[in-house]
Amino acid sequence: MNASINAFNPPAVADQVDWAGKNYLVVDDFIGVRQLLREALRSLGARNIDQASSGGEAMGLLNKTRYDVVLCDFNLGEGKNGQQVLEEARMRNLLLPSSVFLMVSAEKSVESVMGAAEHQPDAYLVKPITEGVLLSRLNRVWRKKQVFNLIDQAYLEKDYLRAARLCEEQVAGNKVHEIDLLRMKARLMERSGEPGKARETYERVLAQREYQWARSGLAKIRLADGDYEQARQMFQTVIAENRYYIDAYDQLALSYQNMGQHEEALSILERAAKLSPNSVPRQRNLGQACLKLGNVGMAEKAFRKCIAIGEYSIRKTPDAYLGLARVCGLKNDPKEALQLLIAVQRDFGAEHPDIELRAKITEGLVYHESGDYRRARKAGDELEALLQAKPERPDVPTCLEMATLLFAVGVKEAPVELLCYVIRNNHDNQLLQDEVQKIFEKARMGEEGEALIRGARKEAIDLMNQGVLLWKTNKLAEAVEWMRNARAALPHNVRILFNSAQILVSHMQQRGYSVELSEEAHGVLAHVDRLQPGQQRFAQLMEQLMLLVPKVEEPVEEAVGDAAGGEAVAA
């Protein structure tokens, strides 16, 4: 890998940023390149410079130190590449909100640049680079990042409404960054469950210039509103204007899937995977779409690619191994399927508590689809035993898949319990209820299934309403305790979780702030945000929680000096 940094006398602009006191990390598998980049940084005045020769070493350093600037090569030899380092650092919040991440590479191929760009480095520098280019890019990115510093901090605290207000406040004094600020504000409004305000912001941007990300943002709002046809047309327009806008392909495929046009969705996913093939989630989605349509050959190719590119990625997924095992079963190769199931339990057992269950479901499906009904029934019996041994239930897709298999091998009681559990935790999700009803009908339990669904819904509603009644009659302590028990019984029911958090907030509003109750409410809301991100009540309750935190008292002289411009904090 060749690289050069030419001699350059830094201009006066370098004095605008104090580079001397910042922490730097240089990541490259060639010592000569690391030394060149280190000397370039030293010429700017940098002193604290760490180096890493591999992606794994870089992650170790990022775990220990908060760096202000990271210069990372794309190709790092064996192990993680630069894209995977950036991806993991972003997902694990190992970078400060104001940190600068520059991807440095000799790679010019569309595939490499697109893959890195999807994970949003602050800049992508193609070798050979000069000190002038490096300094110019650092200054530009650093100044921009400082504008977003307070906003990013509010985002990290999940106070999305405050972050959105900070964006609007910054627009007035930072016209240079107005578009970027509005882009972040729109995303924050979506994250806060305020699609109307997000739409207004996107339209405000489009009134100035036709940005494809703003057009795509409007299309996503249409998609979320269920206007799939209009969303489809808008995403297609975005792609026609910019064929490399990869996210629009993913969203267009989702639009087609929601309209039941799975062949068209598969075609779009295939195009996206050719343009940017190094995305683990995209290859997984492509494989699953192929499997659903019976395109075994393409599914196998996608799952094998997903496993290969995911080897060193934080997005490495058991779905690819389980999907490939299903493919092997359909190809009448149970031997490789079983080897994959052993591998998936070995590689993911520590992080995924449900992996043994999922592997056993896949084993049963492999045997059932290949006609080995005796072994399929044996897998079903073992699944029943696993369910009895573990009171916790898996996620919805796993429950549905398990119920389908258990019905197919002649088991009745366990799948009925699973499907009722799914309904109780999603009592207001009509689409999911329809899917559950189809499983009952396939098991020749149509009428019985309808009655079971009605009963499960009523059970969840009664449980929630009793807690709300206690709250409304001002029996706050009893309401808090009732909702704790309701959460334990139905840990994934978003309505119950939200009401529980609301009751905890009301308790503190009326009877005083409590660290324990505040932490409990934050934990409940964090769980909701993992289950269904982008809910309006999440943003509203997070803001109410922030306002409950007692204000730290300042020294008298400082408080007097700040009185004219200070903000009142509601309690």
Image (cartoon, grey):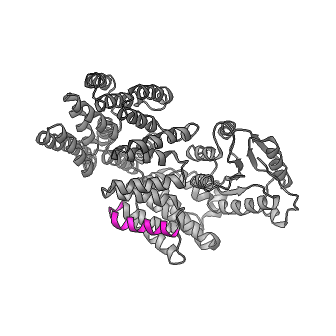
Q: Residue sitting at 46 percent across and 40 percent down?
A: 303
Q: In the rendered view, would you say 456 is above or below 411?
A: below
571 within the magenta span: no
Rendering coords of residue 431 (x, y %) = 26, 51
Rendering coords of residue 461 (x, y %) = 22, 45
The answer to which quarter of the image holds residue 420 is top left
Q: In front: 184, or 478?
A: 184
Question: How many callouts does the rendering have?
Answer: 0
Q: In the rendered view, would you say 60 is above or below 171?
A: above
Q: In front: 23, or 107?
A: 107
Main SS of residues in magenta: helix
Taking the view exactly as shown, the residue that stands out farthest to the bottom is 207
Instruction: Judge from the rendering whether residue 506 lies leftward or rightward of residue 84; answer left or right.
Output: left
Rendering coords of residue 507 (x, y %) = 37, 47
Residue 192 appears in the picture as rendered: no
Instruction: Judge from the rendering whether residue 551 lies leftward or rightward of residue 534; answer left or right.
Output: right
Residue 36 appears in the picture as rendered: yes
Rendering coords of residue 490 (x, y %) = 30, 38
Magenta range: 224-241
Q: Residue sitting at 64 percent across and 56 percent down?
A: 556
Instruction: Judge from the rendering whether residue 394 lies leftward or rightward of residue 431; answer left or right.
Output: right
